[in-house]
Amino acid sequence: MADISFAAIALALNLQLPPTIVCIPVAILCSFLIIHLSQNGKMHGDISIGVFSTGALAVGAMISSMSKRFNTDIYSYMFGSVLAIDDVDIAITITLSLIILVLFLIFYNRFFLITSDETFAKISGINVMFYNFLISFMTALTVVTGMRVVGTLLISSLTIFPALIAKKISRNFKSLVFFSVIISSICFILGMIISFSLNTPTGASIVIANILILCLVLIFEKKI
């Protein structure tokens, strides 16, 4: 989704359209296509992701090479920039965040069952394909939500590091979700402090904060 968003951003900037508005439908559509291809056995999940990601990077690079605004605008989208966020970005971020949160709370039990044991979920009569599409939809929205701050190249850190750190200190799924949110918030604040103090890219600073906390958790885990 991050690579696809990069291509969408390059296209939007080249056409002088709002990047976030263009990214939302493109990311959702491509996420649905990936799920469709993998679910119907037409292409393995890892292969379809590889095809879309590398293809999107190639398209984004081609479009960016033809855009005179590449060095100024694309850079902030690649690595994140809080200073470049405007009122429209804030409004979109809040709206998408609320949609993701509401969907997660409503379908919490189904998500837990599908992600923990998809086979049992199918036997139980749950429409697994529908919820896989829903998870894909939420993932696409998450990428679009965080790309302005963290950047398209580093957005995966928002979904990987907090969950990985939380897994080290959690005993069940609920605590995993809770600690993921807390850790993500702490790393965001710490990353912002690093960014403003050292004048470094916002996205990279947040990732560094995640890495530091992960290292501390691993060290503490070994001592225990």
Image: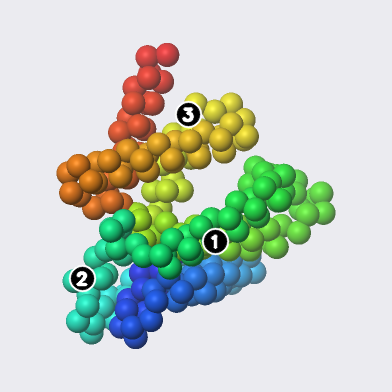
Residue 52 seen in the figure: no
Q: Which mark is residue 72?
A: 2
**Which residue is found at the position 42% from the left and 48% from the top?**
158
Quadrant of residue 135 within the rendered picture: bottom right
From the image, which quarter does the N terminus lie in?
bottom left
Number of the front mark, 3 or 2: 2
Distance from disc 3 to disc 1, alpha carbons, whole Å, reads 31 Å
Closer to the N terminus: mark 3 or mark 2?
A: 2
Element marked by disc 1:
helix
Q: Is residue 70 above or below residue 196?
A: below
Query: Where residue 119 sits: x, y (%)?
Result: 72, 49
Q: Secondary structure at mark 3?
A: helix
Measuring 65% from the left and 55% from the top, which residue is drawn there? 103
| Vertical comparison of 138 with 29: above or below | above
Number of the label disc, if any, that sits on residue 145:
none
Instruction: State left or right for residue 39 relative to residue 224.
Output: right
Where is mark 3, residue-wise? 168
Instruction: Locate residue 79, reporting x and y percent.
Output: 28, 58
**Kind of residue at badge 1:** Thr
Mark 1 crowdedness (10 Å alpha carbons): few <14, some 14-19, many ≥20: few
Pointer 3 or 1: first along the chain: 1
User: Which amino acid type is shown beneath numbered disc 2?
Assistant: Thr
**Left or right of 222, for residue 124:** right
2 or 33: which is nearer to us?
2
Instruction: Look at mark 1 in the image and give the residue it sits on.
Output: 95
Contact check, label 3 and label 2, Cβ < 8 Å: no
| Whole-percent x, y for residue 146 in the image | 42, 56
Comparing 200 with 53, the one in front is 200
